[in-house]
Amino acid sequence: MFEPVLLRNVDVPNGHLLSTYEAGGGYQALTKALREHTPDEIIDLVKKSNLRGRGGAGFPTGAKWSFVPKRAGKPKYLCCNADEGEPGTFKDRIIMERDPHQLIEGMAISAYAIGAETAYVYIRGEYTLAICRLERAIAEAHAKGYLGTRILGSNFSFVVHIHCGAGAYICGEETAMLDSLEGKRAQPRLKPPFPAVEGLYASPTVINNVETLACVPHIVERGPDWFRGIGPDKSPGPKLYCLSGQVRKPGLYELPMGIPLRELVEDCAGGPLPGRKLKAVIPGGVSAPLIPERGLDVRMDFDSLAAAGSMLGSAGVIVIDDSTCVVKVATRIIEFFHHESCGKCTPCREGLNWVVKVLRRVEAGQGAPGDLEQLEALCKGIFGNTFCALGDGAAMGLRAALAHFEHEFVAHIEERRCPFH
Ligand code: L3W
């Protein structure tokens, strides 16, 4: 039986209050970090843990921290990406609503490691309860000396500010988020330079997802070997999985990284609804290519899913049963990306506009022979040719739908209707 780590406080009454967090051993890791470790030692612990970013890309966290230049000069910043705009994703919200101090403690330790005295939580504006709870938790942590000047008698001073987003998916892209924080229209920047070298206000900036930062106190407290002992060695740790869609028990589950997708969907989430069969699963938010039912034995970790042609992404697992039309799913997803495209680069702006037009006519039973080749050609024009991952995610998802469910697209064109209606 797996003991929850990140969700251990979420069902504790008043788990969002400092007194509850402290009663469960909260802020011991920060105390240990400041009293027993240098910043470099903390970076080393996180490197040894093999913690990889939980926001979508799975980049090694300790390596990212070590790219921050050591020299004094410009201030350094920590940004917590709490924009959580990926459809099907709701893990960070639960941490912030139910256990905000876990995130604050993780941020304080991370800031100490990289030498930042200021942090921003860029939070999705719709997350009103999470915003209230974080604001309160920050005030409580200040009053108790876990934030502010010379924390716990050390030389480390650190403050956290909250910045609310205004509803744009692109703000979850790290460099667009930086532009938004700077008061500009959010559009992705060209990388390199990576934010770790030149980020907020052109200063070194580490951007980590909420769940990534929440792992840090546990690594400091229990050690990197404990963390690496959970799940696959190259992609270890406790993991939050968001289960939604046509499944009996949707919800947030914490299990080891690397659990088979089938176990997650059929055992944990109870499998398909009565009388229905699984058709496909999107394993990591709509940016991740869907996996047909026969592929569900894949393990839920970065490398296994990449080898299977998909990705872990934000671990937003969306279950699709046999009552659902894949053409409709693909159309809705591409409409979402088209709507959220920032318009900065031509392949994404124009390409997605064109893809939406073709998909809508196929879905409506007005598709023409040659439309599927047209969609393939458009995906080719978008993939790898955009500033950020938004266009890539859209193209990869559509390609997977076309590859695994071509017969559904063909049926719409040949029968001139949706066979599911
Ligand atoms: C310094 C280098 N830093 C890479 C850093 C980089 C970033 C991280 C990952 O996309 C994915 C995307 C979405 N020196 C570096 C370096 N870095 N090389 O490492 O970078 P990257 O570019 O691989 O990915 P990304 O642009 O951060 C993230 C997918 O996630 N996604 C999105 C989920 C949305 C949420 C949400 O709602 N919370 O997470 C879902 O699947 O499509 O592929 O920090 O700077 N040489």
Image (cartoon, rainbow, N blue to C red):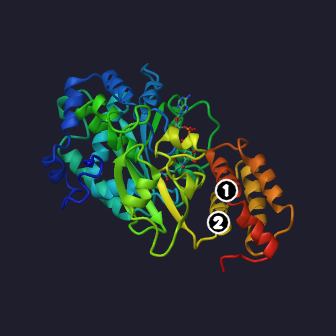
Quarter of the image holding residue 268? bottom left
Does dot 2 land on a helix, a strand or a loop?
helix
Quarter holding the C terminus is: bottom right
Left or right for 175, reference 421: left
Disc marking residue 326:
2
Q: Is residue 109 left or right of residue 384?
A: left
The percent position of residue 273, horizontal first and vertical second, equals 45, 72
Callout 1 crowding tier (Cα within 10 Å): few <14, some 14–19, many ≥20: some
Q: Which residue is mark 1?
A: 404
Number of labels in the image equals 2
Q: Which residue is depicted at the point 83% across and 57% down?
A: 374
Choose top left, top right, bottom left or bottom right for residue 114.
Answer: top left
**156 versus 363 height, above or below:** above
Residue 373 place in picture, x, y as percent: 82, 56
Q: Nearer the viewer, mark 1 or mark 2?
A: 1
Judge from the rendering whether residue 338 lies leftward or rightward of residue 97; answer left or right. right
Can see residue 138? no
Q: Are marks 1 and 2 in contact (CB under 8 Å)?
A: yes
Q: Label 1, label 2: how many angstroms apart (C-alpha)?
A: 10 Å
Residue type beneath disc 2 = Val
Any atom of ligand 1 within 8 Å of the CB at mark 2? no
Q: Is residue 251 left or right of residue 187?
A: left
276 or 382: which is nearer to us? 276
Ligand 1 is found in which quarter of the picture?
A: top right
- Which structural element holds mark 1? helix
State the residue in front, 103 or 248: 248
